[in-house]
Image: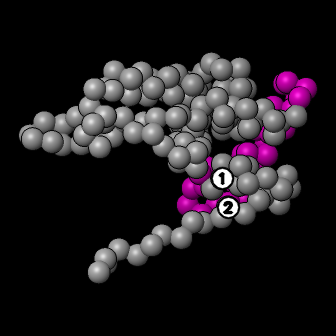
Amino acid sequence: MSRKNIVKKKTVEPDPIYRNRLVNMLVNRILRDGKKSLAYRILYGAIKNIRRKTKKNPLSILRQAINRVTPNVTVKARRIGGSTYQIPLEIRSTQGKTLAIGWILSASKKRSGIYMAIKLSYELIDAAKDNGIAVRKKEETHKMAESNRAFAHFR
């Protein structure tokens, strides 16, 4: 008899203004110390800045950016016989989306500037154009998985 409980999938509620689940996922990742209103203010400021800069629908740019950054494979360190191998693993779309959101947020924090909303908007615009720090992180992960393809049988 297994002691592990079965984890129920949590459905993400849509955000109040755009009625979009992806926006709420981003807000929940921006969230620090329970200050959700500040996280909403940062994201909505970024969306407003995207609309002003690109003159396009900011939700489509957001969706496009996250699709461009979402990885298909990732590497996981596994210790076998005294040595550690990087084993490539295919990942589900939800896990890939979570990774993409984390990479976009960390890349926007590394950008120069004061306001997080502006840094996030520029990172999202760059990711939608298929360049930027987060896209580079995805390509780096794919290269690492490709170079360690020989260890795929250790799964």
Please indicate whether residue 149 sits to the left or right of residue 38 in the image: left
Callout 1 environment at 10 Å: few (<14), some (14 to 19), or many (20+)? some
What's the magenta bit mostly, secondary-structure-wise? helix
Please indicate whether residue 92 sits to the left or right of residue 150 in the image: right
Residue topped by disc 2: 12
Image position, residue 34 (x, y; %): 60, 63
- Helix or strand or loop: what does disc 2 sit on? loop
In the rendered picture of this protein, how many numbered marks are placed on residues?
2
Q: Quadrant of the N terminus?
A: bottom left
Amino acid type of disc 1?
Answer: Met
Callout 2 environment at 10 Å: few (<14), some (14 to 19), or many (20+)? few
Amino acid type of disc 2?
Answer: Val
* 53 vs 20, nearest the viewer: 20
Image position, residue 96 (x, y; %): 54, 42
> Do tag 1 and tag 2 residues touch (Cβ < 8 Å)?
yes
Residue 60 vertical placement versus 38 (above, below): above
Residue 10 vertical placement versus 149 (above, below): below
Image position, residue 38 (x, y; %): 70, 54
Range covered by the magenta-colored residues:
29-56
User: Is residue 40 on the magenta stretch?
Assistant: yes
Q: Residue furthest right?
A: 55
Image position, residue 44 (x, y; %): 79, 46
Visible in this render: residue 114?
no
User: Is residue 20 on the magenta stretch?
Assistant: no
Residue 126 vertical placement versus 61 (above, below): above
Q: Residue at 48%, 43% (x, y): give it.
A: 91
- Helix or strand or loop: what does disc 1 sit on? helix
Picture quadrant of residue 93: top right
Residue 73 vertical placement versus 38 (above, below): above
Please indicate whether residue 87 sits to the left or right of residue 50 in the image: left
